[in-house]
Amino acid sequence: MSFTWNAFGWLNLGLDVLSVLLGLGAILYALRRWDPGARFTFRTFKISTRALVLAFCGWLPVVGYIGGIVGFSLAARLAWTAATVTIPLLCLYLARSRRAPWLAAAAVALIAAKYYGEVWEPGNLEVERVTVHLPGLTHRVKLVHLSDLQTDTIGPLHERVRREANAFEPDLVLFTGDLVNHPSLAAAAGDWLAGFTPAGRKYFVTGDIDGGMEVHGLLRRAGFELLDSRRLVVEPAGARLTLLGVDIWNWREDGYLARLAEGAPRPRLLLSHRPDAALVAGDAFDLVLSGHTHGGQVCLPLWGPLVTLSNVARKIAAGGLHRIGATQILVSRGLGWEGHVAPRVRTFCRPHLILIELIPSPDAPR
Protein backbone atom coordinates (compact mmCIF):
# COMPACT_ATOMS: atom_id res chain seq x y z
CA MET A 1 0.00 0.00 0.00
CA SER A 2 2.85 2.27 -0.89
CA PHE A 3 3.45 4.54 -3.86
CA THR A 4 6.89 2.93 -4.21
CA TRP A 5 8.08 -0.64 -4.74
CA ASN A 6 11.41 -2.04 -3.66
CA ALA A 7 13.34 -5.16 -2.77
CA PHE A 8 11.28 -5.45 0.43
CA GLY A 9 8.02 -4.71 -1.36
CA TRP A 10 6.22 -7.99 -0.70
CA LEU A 11 7.20 -8.01 2.97
CA ASN A 12 6.10 -4.40 3.41
CA LEU A 13 2.85 -4.97 1.53
CA GLY A 14 2.07 -7.94 3.76
CA LEU A 15 2.73 -5.86 6.87
CA ASP A 16 0.53 -3.05 5.54
CA VAL A 17 -2.37 -5.38 4.71
CA LEU A 18 -2.18 -7.10 8.08
CA SER A 19 -1.96 -3.78 9.89
CA VAL A 20 -4.99 -2.36 8.04
CA LEU A 21 -7.09 -5.49 8.54
CA LEU A 22 -6.35 -5.63 12.27
CA GLY A 23 -6.91 -1.90 12.72
CA LEU A 24 -10.16 -1.70 10.77
CA GLY A 25 -11.38 -4.96 12.27
CA ALA A 26 -10.84 -3.68 15.82
CA ILE A 27 -12.54 -0.36 15.06
CA LEU A 28 -15.59 -1.83 13.32
CA TYR A 29 -16.07 -4.43 16.04
CA ALA A 30 -15.91 -1.74 18.72
CA LEU A 31 -18.35 0.52 16.86
CA ARG A 32 -20.91 -2.20 16.30
CA ARG A 33 -20.77 -3.26 19.91
CA TRP A 34 -20.61 0.08 21.73
CA ASP A 35 -21.85 2.67 19.22
CA PRO A 36 -24.42 1.16 16.83
CA GLY A 37 -26.01 4.54 16.04
CA ALA A 38 -26.78 5.79 12.54
CA ARG A 39 -24.94 9.11 12.82
CA PHE A 40 -21.39 10.22 13.52
CA THR A 41 -20.97 11.54 17.07
CA PHE A 42 -18.14 12.38 19.43
CA ARG A 43 -18.70 8.95 20.96
CA THR A 44 -17.98 7.41 17.55
CA PHE A 45 -14.70 9.30 17.42
CA LYS A 46 -13.65 8.23 20.93
CA ILE A 47 -14.42 4.57 20.36
CA SER A 48 -12.65 4.54 16.97
CA THR A 49 -9.56 6.23 18.41
CA ARG A 50 -9.30 3.87 21.35
CA ALA A 51 -9.75 0.80 19.17
CA LEU A 52 -7.04 1.99 16.75
CA VAL A 53 -4.62 2.67 19.62
CA LEU A 54 -5.28 -0.78 21.07
CA ALA A 55 -4.72 -2.38 17.65
CA PHE A 56 -1.40 -0.52 17.36
CA CYS A 57 -0.38 -1.53 20.89
CA GLY A 58 -0.94 -5.15 19.88
CA TRP A 59 2.16 -4.82 17.71
CA LEU A 60 4.37 -3.58 20.54
CA PRO A 61 5.55 -7.05 21.66
CA VAL A 62 6.71 -7.71 18.09
CA VAL A 63 8.40 -4.31 17.87
CA GLY A 64 10.07 -4.83 21.24
CA TYR A 65 11.24 -8.33 20.36
CA ILE A 66 12.85 -7.17 17.11
CA GLY A 67 14.31 -4.04 18.72
CA GLY A 68 16.97 -1.75 17.29
CA ILE A 69 16.57 0.26 14.12
CA VAL A 70 14.47 -2.47 12.47
CA GLY A 71 12.00 -2.50 15.36
CA PHE A 72 11.84 1.29 15.28
CA SER A 73 11.32 1.19 11.51
CA LEU A 74 8.47 -1.29 11.91
CA ALA A 75 6.76 0.97 14.45
CA ALA A 76 7.17 3.93 12.09
CA ARG A 77 5.67 1.92 9.23
CA LEU A 78 2.67 0.86 11.31
CA ALA A 79 2.03 4.47 12.37
CA TRP A 80 2.36 5.79 8.81
CA THR A 81 0.07 3.07 7.42
CA ALA A 82 -2.52 3.77 10.11
CA ALA A 83 -2.48 7.51 9.34
CA THR A 84 -2.54 7.27 5.55
CA VAL A 85 -4.43 4.03 4.82
CA THR A 86 -6.43 2.75 7.81
CA ILE A 87 -7.87 6.11 8.88
CA PRO A 88 -8.79 7.22 5.32
CA LEU A 89 -10.62 3.91 4.76
CA LEU A 90 -12.43 4.36 8.07
CA CYS A 91 -13.36 7.92 7.13
CA LEU A 92 -14.85 6.77 3.82
CA TYR A 93 -16.84 4.07 5.59
CA LEU A 94 -18.19 6.46 8.22
CA ALA A 95 -18.91 9.15 5.65
CA ARG A 96 -21.42 6.82 4.05
CA SER A 97 -22.70 4.75 6.97
CA ARG A 98 -22.93 7.58 9.52
CA ARG A 99 -24.05 10.38 7.16
CA ALA A 100 -20.92 12.47 7.65
CA PRO A 101 -19.85 13.53 4.14
CA TRP A 102 -17.16 15.83 5.52
CA LEU A 103 -15.22 12.72 6.51
CA ALA A 104 -14.72 11.96 2.82
CA ALA A 105 -12.81 15.24 2.53
CA ALA A 106 -10.66 14.18 5.51
CA ALA A 107 -9.92 10.89 3.75
CA VAL A 108 -8.85 12.70 0.59
CA ALA A 109 -6.59 15.02 2.62
CA LEU A 110 -4.84 12.07 4.29
CA ILE A 111 -4.32 10.29 0.97
CA ALA A 112 -2.90 13.54 -0.43
CA ALA A 113 -0.51 13.63 2.54
CA LYS A 114 0.58 10.10 1.65
CA TYR A 115 1.28 11.17 -1.94
CA TYR A 116 3.19 14.23 -0.73
CA GLY A 117 5.35 12.23 1.68
CA GLU A 118 6.07 9.26 -0.59
CA VAL A 119 6.23 10.87 -4.04
CA TRP A 120 6.40 14.66 -4.08
CA GLU A 121 8.85 15.51 -1.31
CA PRO A 122 11.28 12.63 -1.99
CA GLY A 123 11.57 13.80 -5.60
CA ASN A 124 11.90 17.51 -4.79
CA LEU A 125 15.67 17.99 -4.78
CA GLU A 126 17.27 20.91 -2.97
CA VAL A 127 20.59 22.04 -4.40
CA GLU A 128 22.33 24.01 -1.66
CA ARG A 129 25.38 26.14 -2.41
CA VAL A 130 27.56 26.67 0.65
CA THR A 131 30.58 28.90 1.07
CA VAL A 132 33.06 27.82 3.75
CA HIS A 133 35.97 30.00 4.88
CA LEU A 134 39.05 28.00 5.83
CA PRO A 135 42.20 29.40 7.42
CA GLY A 136 45.35 28.20 5.73
CA LEU A 137 43.69 27.71 2.34
CA THR A 138 45.49 29.48 -0.51
CA HIS A 139 43.08 28.98 -3.44
CA ARG A 140 39.37 28.45 -3.96
CA VAL A 141 38.28 24.81 -4.15
CA LYS A 142 34.91 23.43 -5.28
CA LEU A 143 33.54 20.26 -3.70
CA VAL A 144 30.43 18.16 -4.21
CA HIS A 145 29.12 16.53 -1.04
CA LEU A 146 26.88 13.47 -1.47
CA SER A 147 25.48 11.18 1.20
CA ASP A 148 22.88 8.49 1.90
CA LEU A 149 21.84 7.57 -1.63
CA GLN A 150 19.71 4.75 -0.12
CA THR A 151 17.43 4.42 -3.11
CA ASP A 152 15.21 1.65 -4.40
CA THR A 153 15.97 2.60 -7.99
CA ILE A 154 18.02 5.12 -9.97
CA GLY A 155 15.52 7.62 -11.31
CA PRO A 156 15.07 11.20 -12.53
CA LEU A 157 16.07 12.69 -9.17
CA HIS A 158 19.45 10.97 -9.30
CA GLU A 159 20.07 11.97 -12.89
CA ARG A 160 19.39 15.58 -11.93
CA VAL A 161 21.82 15.25 -8.99
CA ARG A 162 24.55 14.14 -11.34
CA ARG A 163 23.81 16.87 -13.90
CA GLU A 164 23.86 19.60 -11.24
CA ALA A 165 27.05 18.24 -9.70
CA ASN A 166 28.92 18.01 -13.00
CA ALA A 167 27.70 21.44 -14.12
CA PHE A 168 29.28 22.86 -10.94
CA GLU A 169 32.66 21.67 -12.31
CA PRO A 170 33.91 20.46 -8.93
CA ASP A 171 37.51 19.79 -8.05
CA LEU A 172 36.56 16.85 -5.78
CA VAL A 173 33.49 14.67 -5.17
CA LEU A 174 33.05 13.42 -1.58
CA PHE A 175 30.51 10.76 -0.53
CA THR A 176 29.90 10.23 3.18
CA GLY A 177 28.39 6.76 3.24
CA ASP A 178 25.20 4.64 3.01
CA LEU A 179 24.97 3.80 -0.65
CA VAL A 180 22.03 1.43 -1.20
CA ASN A 181 19.38 -0.29 0.92
CA HIS A 182 19.78 -3.64 -0.83
CA PRO A 183 22.82 -5.27 -2.50
CA SER A 184 20.79 -5.97 -5.67
CA LEU A 185 21.00 -2.24 -6.42
CA ALA A 186 24.78 -2.01 -6.07
CA ALA A 187 25.52 -2.33 -9.80
CA ALA A 188 23.09 0.45 -10.75
CA ALA A 189 24.43 2.67 -7.97
CA GLY A 190 27.99 2.01 -9.14
CA ASP A 191 27.11 3.03 -12.70
CA TRP A 192 25.53 6.20 -11.33
CA LEU A 193 28.61 7.05 -9.27
CA ALA A 194 30.84 6.49 -12.27
CA GLY A 195 29.08 9.36 -14.08
CA PHE A 196 30.42 12.05 -11.74
CA THR A 197 33.29 13.87 -13.45
CA PRO A 198 35.28 16.15 -11.15
CA ALA A 199 38.54 17.74 -12.21
CA GLY A 200 40.27 15.75 -9.46
CA ARG A 201 39.45 12.60 -7.52
CA LYS A 202 36.36 11.05 -5.90
CA TYR A 203 36.43 9.80 -2.29
CA PHE A 204 34.09 7.65 -0.19
CA VAL A 205 33.73 6.70 3.48
CA THR A 206 31.44 3.86 4.51
CA GLY A 207 28.23 4.19 6.48
CA ASP A 208 25.99 1.88 8.50
CA ILE A 209 24.67 -0.18 5.59
CA ASP A 210 27.73 -0.43 3.34
CA GLY A 211 29.19 -3.47 5.08
CA GLY A 212 26.81 -5.84 3.29
CA MET A 213 28.31 -5.10 -0.13
CA GLU A 214 31.62 -5.69 -1.86
CA VAL A 215 32.43 -1.99 -1.53
CA HIS A 216 36.04 -2.04 -2.73
CA GLY A 217 35.30 -3.44 -6.18
CA LEU A 218 32.22 -1.28 -6.65
CA LEU A 219 34.09 1.91 -5.77
CA ARG A 220 37.06 0.98 -7.92
CA ARG A 221 34.82 0.50 -10.94
CA ALA A 222 33.07 3.80 -10.20
CA GLY A 223 36.37 5.67 -9.89
CA PHE A 224 36.03 6.35 -6.16
CA GLU A 225 38.77 5.88 -3.59
CA LEU A 226 37.90 4.47 -0.16
CA LEU A 227 39.09 6.84 2.58
CA ASP A 228 38.23 4.82 5.70
CA SER A 229 40.97 5.11 8.37
CA ARG A 230 43.19 7.07 6.00
CA ARG A 231 44.48 10.54 5.43
CA LEU A 232 45.65 12.03 2.17
CA VAL A 233 47.19 15.34 1.24
CA VAL A 234 45.60 16.50 -2.01
CA GLU A 235 46.16 19.58 -4.13
CA PRO A 236 42.96 20.43 -6.01
CA ALA A 237 42.94 23.66 -8.02
CA GLY A 238 46.40 24.56 -6.72
CA ALA A 239 45.33 24.45 -3.08
CA ARG A 240 46.59 22.04 -0.44
CA LEU A 241 44.14 20.09 1.76
CA THR A 242 44.33 17.12 4.05
CA LEU A 243 41.42 14.69 3.65
CA LEU A 244 40.85 12.31 6.55
CA GLY A 245 38.25 9.56 6.64
CA VAL A 246 36.69 7.37 9.33
CA ASP A 247 34.16 4.56 9.21
CA ILE A 248 31.22 4.32 11.60
CA TRP A 249 33.23 2.59 14.33
CA ASN A 250 36.82 3.76 14.60
CA TRP A 251 36.06 7.40 15.48
CA ARG A 252 34.59 6.14 18.78
CA GLU A 253 37.95 4.84 19.99
CA ASP A 254 39.40 7.13 22.61
CA GLY A 255 42.00 9.42 21.05
CA TYR A 256 41.64 7.93 17.56
CA LEU A 257 40.73 11.17 15.79
CA ALA A 258 43.55 13.07 17.45
CA ARG A 259 46.05 10.41 16.35
CA LEU A 260 44.65 10.41 12.82
CA ALA A 261 45.05 14.17 12.53
CA GLU A 262 48.37 14.50 14.32
CA GLY A 263 50.95 16.27 12.18
CA ALA A 264 48.63 16.58 9.15
CA PRO A 265 48.86 19.88 7.25
CA ARG A 266 45.95 22.27 7.56
CA PRO A 267 43.28 22.84 6.49
CA ARG A 268 41.96 19.41 7.47
CA LEU A 269 38.65 17.99 6.24
CA LEU A 270 37.19 15.00 8.07
CA LEU A 271 34.76 12.71 6.24
CA SER A 272 32.60 10.83 8.75
CA HIS A 273 29.25 9.22 8.01
CA ARG A 274 28.01 10.03 11.50
CA PRO A 275 28.12 13.69 12.58
CA ASP A 276 28.70 12.55 16.16
CA ALA A 277 32.41 12.35 15.33
CA ALA A 278 32.49 16.15 15.50
CA LEU A 279 31.50 15.96 19.18
CA VAL A 280 34.81 14.31 20.05
CA ALA A 281 37.00 15.91 17.38
CA GLY A 282 37.93 18.99 19.39
CA ASP A 283 39.78 21.47 17.20
CA ALA A 284 41.69 18.81 15.25
CA PHE A 285 39.71 19.48 12.06
CA ASP A 286 38.65 22.61 10.21
CA LEU A 287 35.59 21.10 8.53
CA VAL A 288 33.63 17.89 9.11
CA LEU A 289 31.42 16.48 6.33
CA SER A 290 28.72 14.03 7.43
CA GLY A 291 25.36 12.46 6.59
CA HIS A 292 23.48 9.68 8.43
CA THR A 293 20.59 11.71 9.90
CA HIS A 294 18.63 12.17 6.64
CA GLY A 295 17.81 15.56 8.15
CA GLY A 296 15.35 13.68 10.34
CA GLN A 297 13.54 12.47 7.18
CA VAL A 298 10.17 13.21 8.81
CA CYS A 299 10.01 16.82 9.99
CA LEU A 300 7.28 19.18 11.13
CA PRO A 301 7.00 22.87 10.20
CA LEU A 302 8.48 25.18 12.87
CA TRP A 303 9.63 22.13 14.84
CA GLY A 304 12.03 20.26 12.60
CA PRO A 305 13.03 16.60 12.79
CA LEU A 306 11.11 14.24 15.04
CA VAL A 307 13.98 11.73 15.24
CA THR A 308 17.62 12.12 14.14
CA LEU A 309 19.40 8.99 15.48
CA SER A 310 22.31 11.22 16.43
CA ASN A 311 23.63 12.94 19.55
CA VAL A 312 24.36 16.24 17.82
CA ALA A 313 21.87 19.06 18.35
CA ARG A 314 18.66 18.72 16.34
CA LYS A 315 19.35 21.91 14.38
CA ILE A 316 22.70 20.41 13.31
CA ALA A 317 21.22 17.00 12.48
CA ALA A 318 18.58 18.76 10.38
CA GLY A 319 21.31 19.58 7.87
CA GLY A 320 23.41 22.46 6.63
CA LEU A 321 26.50 24.28 7.90
CA HIS A 322 26.99 24.73 11.65
CA ARG A 323 29.69 24.96 14.29
CA ILE A 324 30.55 22.63 17.13
CA GLY A 325 33.09 24.54 19.16
CA ALA A 326 35.89 25.63 16.86
CA THR A 327 34.98 23.08 14.17
CA GLN A 328 32.66 23.73 11.26
CA ILE A 329 30.35 20.83 10.36
CA LEU A 330 28.31 20.39 7.20
CA VAL A 331 25.58 17.74 7.43
CA SER A 332 23.82 16.42 4.35
CA ARG A 333 20.16 15.40 4.57
CA GLY A 334 21.02 12.74 2.00
CA LEU A 335 19.20 11.71 -1.14
CA GLY A 336 17.20 8.69 0.01
CA TRP A 337 15.44 7.18 2.96
CA GLU A 338 15.61 4.43 5.54
CA GLY A 339 15.25 0.95 4.02
CA HIS A 340 13.98 -2.47 5.06
CA VAL A 341 10.49 -2.19 6.62
CA ALA A 342 10.69 1.58 7.19
CA PRO A 343 8.13 3.70 5.33
CA ARG A 344 9.63 5.36 2.27
CA VAL A 345 8.62 8.87 3.26
CA ARG A 346 10.02 12.39 3.60
CA THR A 347 8.08 15.34 4.98
CA PHE A 348 9.39 18.91 5.01
CA CYS A 349 12.85 17.45 4.47
CA ARG A 350 13.92 17.56 0.85
CA PRO A 351 16.70 15.41 -0.64
CA HIS A 352 19.94 17.31 -0.45
CA LEU A 353 22.81 17.96 -2.85
CA ILE A 354 25.50 20.24 -1.41
CA LEU A 355 27.83 22.22 -3.65
CA ILE A 356 30.65 23.66 -1.55
CA GLU A 357 33.05 26.46 -2.34
CA LEU A 358 36.01 26.57 0.02
CA ILE A 359 37.63 29.98 0.09
CA PRO A 360 40.63 31.33 2.02
CA SER A 361 39.88 33.17 5.22
CA PRO A 362 40.92 36.82 5.18
CA ASP A 363 43.89 36.03 7.41
CA ALA A 364 45.01 33.06 5.31
CA PRO A 365 48.50 33.23 3.85
CA ARG A 366 48.68 34.32 0.22
Image: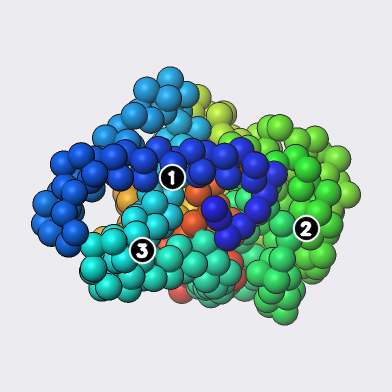
Asked if disc 3 and disc 2 are in contact, CB closer than 8 Å, the reply is no
Which tag, 1 or 3, sits closer to the chain's start? 1
Q: Is residue 278 above or below residue 198?
A: above
Q: CA distance from mark 3 to mark 2?
A: 45 Å
Which tag, 3 or 2, sits closer to the chain's start? 3
Left or right for 96, reference 219? left
Amino acid type indicated by mark 2: Leu
| Residue tagged 3 | 92
User: Which of the two discs, 1 and 3, sits closer to the camera?
Assistant: 3
User: Mark 3, residues whose alpha carbon is within 10 Å: few (<14), some, or many (≥20)?
Assistant: many
Q: Is residue 112 above or below residue 269?
A: below
Q: Residue furthest top?
A: 65
Amino acid type indicated by mark 3: Leu
| Residue tagged 1 | 20
Which tag, 1 or 2, sits closer to the chain's start? 1
For label 2, the SS is: helix
